[in-house]
Image: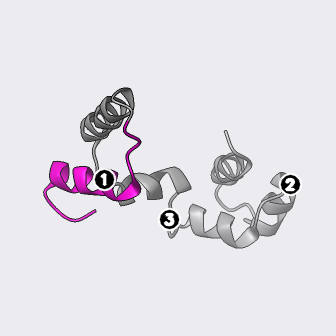
Amino acid sequence: ISPIDKAVEDFKLQEPGEELLYTKFAEKYNVSKVTLAQRCQGKQAPKKAQAVNQQQLNPQQELELVEYIRGLTKKGLLPTREMVQNFASQIVKEPV
């Protein structure tokens, strides 16, 4: 578990009425006070969640793409970035 996630967990365990100071927890876990505050207030998602939201291929489609790349590689054809993008676009039926 990352330091920022530990800091968020610890911060949320505070008793109601206790003085909630982001600075105290940010210093304890050596994380950004701003990031900690945004995470605790739900204004910023963890990086992993952000990445999933930006992902254009679902896991099954990713596997198809990997198999396509492996197939080309076995034939001695190293796929270019453009080839991979074109195939990915065909899979999701929109530009990638």
Q: CA distance from mark 2 to mark 3?
A: 21 Å
Mark 2 vs 1: CB contact within 8 A:
no
Residue 24 point in image, percent of width and height: 84, 62
Which of the 4 image quadrants contains residue 85?
Answer: bottom left
- Residue that appears at 84% across and 57% down: 30
Q: Amino acid at mark 3?
A: Gly
Relative to 4, 29 lies left or right: right
SS at badge 2:
helix
User: Given the current orientation, which residue lies at the most extreme top position?
Assistant: 74
- Looking at the image, is 71 positioned above or below residue 2? above
Q: How is the image coloured?
A: one colour
SS at badge 1:
helix
Label 2 neighbour load within 10 Å: few <14, some 14-19, many 20+:
few
Q: Which mark is residue 83?
A: 1
Residue 91 lies within the magenta run: yes
Q: Nearer the viewer, mark 1 or mark 3?
A: 1
Q: Which quadrant holds the C terminus? A: bottom left
Label 1 neighbour load within 10 Å: few <14, some 14-19, many 20+:
few
Q: Which quadrant holds the N terminus? A: top right
Residue 71 point in image, percent of width and height: 30, 30
Q: Which mark is residue 42?
A: 3
Q: Earlier in the sequence, mark 2 or mark 1?
A: 2
- Looking at the image, is 6 positioned above or below residue 86? above
Residue 66 point in image, percent of width and height: 35, 35
SS at badge 3:
loop
Q: Which residue is mark 2?
A: 28
Q: Earlier in the sequence, mark 2 or mark 3?
A: 2
